[in-house]
Image (tube, helix red, strand yellow):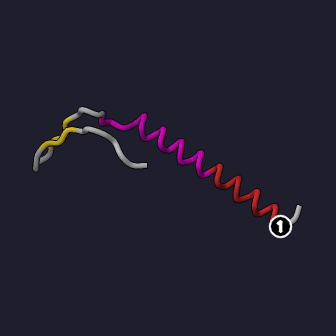
Amino acid sequence: MDLITYNTKLKEIEKTYNDSKLELLIQYTKENNPYKIGDVITDHIGSIQIESYQGI
């Protein structure tokens, strides 16, 4: 194995790791979000109803 092959394989491993880590984070936040679609949130300015989620 030469240095170029090593670096290529290392980058593939790091990408797989980062993708898996992001997927786990998304799953965690979806399962632990206290707010659901349809909930109404009120503060001193007014109220809003959650219609959808956007983000990652």
Residue farthest toward the left in the current orientation of the protein: 45
Side of 53 where 13 appears, left or right: right
Residue at image coords 47%, 39%: 28
Say above or below: 8 vs 36. Answer: below
Side of 5 where 24 appears, left or right: left
User: Please, what secondary structure does the residue beneath circle 1 have?
Assistant: helix
**Residue 6, x across and y down, in percent:** 80, 61
What residue type is disc 1 on?
Leu
The one nearer the camera, 52 or 28, is 52
Q: Which residue is mark 1?
A: 3
Range shown magenta: 18-36
**Residue 32, x across and y down, in percent:** 40, 36
**Residue 43, x across and y down, in percent:** 14, 46
Q: Quadrant of the N terminus?
A: bottom right
Report if residue 30 lies within the magenta region. yes
- Badge 1: residue crowd in 10 Å (few <14, some 14–19, many ≥20): few
Report if residue 25 lies within the magenta region. yes
Residue at image coords 23%, 33%: 39
Instruction: Tell me the quarter of the picture where residue 30 sits.
Output: top left
Residue farthest toward the bottom in the current orientation of the protein: 3
Callout count: 1
Side of 45 where 50 appears, left or right: right
- Most common secondary structure along the magenta stretch: helix
Instruction: Tell me the quarter of the picture where residue 4 sits.
Output: bottom right
